[in-house]
Image (tube, grey):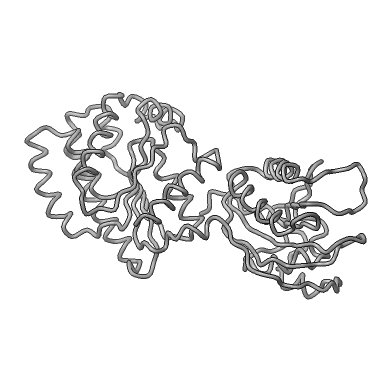
């Protein structure tokens, strides 16, 4: 189930360097509105509704955490930044850049500033022809028709000329060169959120840890000495079973899989929580299991400082986590970093997100993607 909104935008330009205007708009939208996951070809189309130079047009689909009004507000700011001058006139005129919100999921929105779906989209080939390139399973929520039906019914006879393909930032990040990626981090680092978002944007299969189903977890936070060993043993058994079962559903040589944990975390947490004797026994059992486990092609560790972790834990509001001491988080962080140093054969990427908020800020999410892209370039 998607956690982000799917938005379709239509872009046009008939003033200045039209191609450059479109390319700059794509970059700005990706950085500030949402992750662009598909872009149409570029088309040349006649001016619609007035006499003017031909337009360059394209369409794109993006994933965003923002609501529709916020998306509109940001794209209007992008238009202005890239030279669009708006007037009070309601007549159509030439412009350096025009960005229209065509669809927001399959919602119907009628507010003072925004009407979605765009009320004239079904009348305009310069919107629908580029949209067709996106290959979306999208149905007009008012007309109850899919795009091929809207195109067939259109009375617009404009001559639309395909010019070229367009590049976009996500195209440069070839995550699918890896079959299996694990994202790790301390408690509250945001690994599950990041895993979910990357999986949605890159169309990956997911493996999520089932920590919420562990009956020993609340008990552990109440009495660590008593429940540490059964907690760690149950986690180890469950992680082994889950990874074995989930990865068996996928072809590790064909499917792109992303997980929000790596089974080695079991040993890291056990070293912090168990007594010396318990840990020795636990490690023997762990090493037997670990040999059988597939290893990730890329291991991403999200580092956050302890103060930030405590804030995140407080904000997400899980009652059994609220009394976690800072010292415990410090030990977990140290355990992860010591483990990473010892893993000479593991392809590791450490991303410091202590001052980043990749949940609410698109530019911070782009920062994470660019860190992954740099890692790919250096491999």
Residue appearing at x 56%, y 49% in the figure: 4
Q: Quadrant of the rendered structure where residue 42 is?
A: bottom right
309 displayed left or right of 45: left
Q: Position of residue 3 (x, y in %)?
A: 53, 49
**Is 107 rendered above or below residue 214?**
below
Residue 53: give x, y in percent of width and height.
85, 62
Instruction: Determine the residue located farthest toward the front in the rendered image.
Output: 17
Q: x, y percentage for residue 43? A: 73, 67
Q: Is residue 234 left or right of residue 140?
A: left
92 over 303 or under it: above or below: below
Write the residue at 16% across / 38% down.
Answer: 229
Q: Position of residue 332 (x, y in %)?
A: 26, 34
The vertical placement of 310 against 364, above or below, is above
Q: Residue at x 44, y 53 (%)?
A: 373
Q: Which is nearer the eye, 318 or 308?
A: 308
Q: Is residue 28 left or right of residue 309?
A: right
| Number of marks in picture | 0
Q: Residue at x 28, y 40 (%)?
A: 215
**Left or right: where 288 falls relative to 244:** left
* Between 178 and 184, the one nearer to me in the picture: 178
Quadrant into which the C terminus falls: bottom left
Taking depth in this image into account, of 341 and 113 the one nearest to the observer is 341
Seen in the picture, residue 217 relative to 247 is either above or below; the reply is: above
């Amino acid at each position: 189930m998607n956690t982000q909104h799917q938005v379709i935008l239509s872009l046009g330009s008939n003033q200045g360097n039209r191609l450059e205007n479109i390319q700059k708009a794509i970059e700005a939208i990706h950085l500030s509105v949402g992750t662009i996951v598909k872009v149409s070809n570029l088309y040349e189309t006649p001016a619609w509704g007035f006499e003017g130079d031909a337009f360059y047009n394209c369409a794109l689909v993006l994933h965003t955490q923002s609501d529709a009004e916020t998306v509109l507000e940001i794209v209007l700011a992008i238009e202005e930044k890239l030279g669009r001058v708006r007037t009070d006139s309601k007549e159509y005129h030439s412009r350096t850049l025009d960005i229209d919100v065509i669809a927001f999921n399959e919602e119907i929105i009628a507010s003072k500033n925004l009407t979605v779906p765009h009320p004239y989209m079904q009348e305009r080939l310069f919107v629908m022809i580029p949209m067709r390139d996106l290959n979306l399973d999208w149905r007009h929520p008012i007309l109850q028709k899919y795009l091929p039906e809207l195109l067939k019914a259109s009375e617009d006879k404009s001559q639309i000329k395909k010019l070229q393909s367009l590049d976009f930032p996500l195209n440069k990040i070839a995550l699918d060169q890896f079959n299996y990626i694990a994202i790790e981090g301390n408690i509250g680092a945001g690994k599950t959120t990041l895993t979910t978002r990357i999986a949605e944007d890159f169309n990956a299969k997911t493996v999520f840890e089932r920590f919420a189903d562990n009956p020993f977890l609340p008990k552990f936070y109440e009495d660590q000495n008593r429940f540490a060993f059964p907690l760690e043993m149950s986690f180890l058994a469950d992680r082994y079973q889950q990874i074995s079962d989930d990865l068996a559903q996928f072809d590790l040589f064909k499917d792109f899989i992303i997980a929000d944990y790596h089974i080695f975390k079991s040993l890291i947490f056990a070293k912090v929580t168990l007594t010396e004797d318990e840990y020795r026994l636990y490690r023997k059992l762990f090493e037997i299991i670990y040999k059988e486990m597939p290893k990730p092609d890329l291991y991403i560790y999200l580092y956050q400082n302890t103060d930030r972790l405590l804030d995140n834990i407080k904000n997400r509001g899980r009652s059994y986590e609220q009394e976690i001491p800072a010292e415990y988080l410090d030990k977990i962080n140290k355990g992860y970093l010591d483990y990473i140093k010892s893993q000479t054969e593991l392809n590791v990427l450490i991303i410091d997100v202590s001052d980043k908020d990749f949940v609410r800020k698109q530019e911070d999410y782009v920062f994470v993607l660019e860190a992954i892209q740099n890692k790919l370039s250096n491999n």
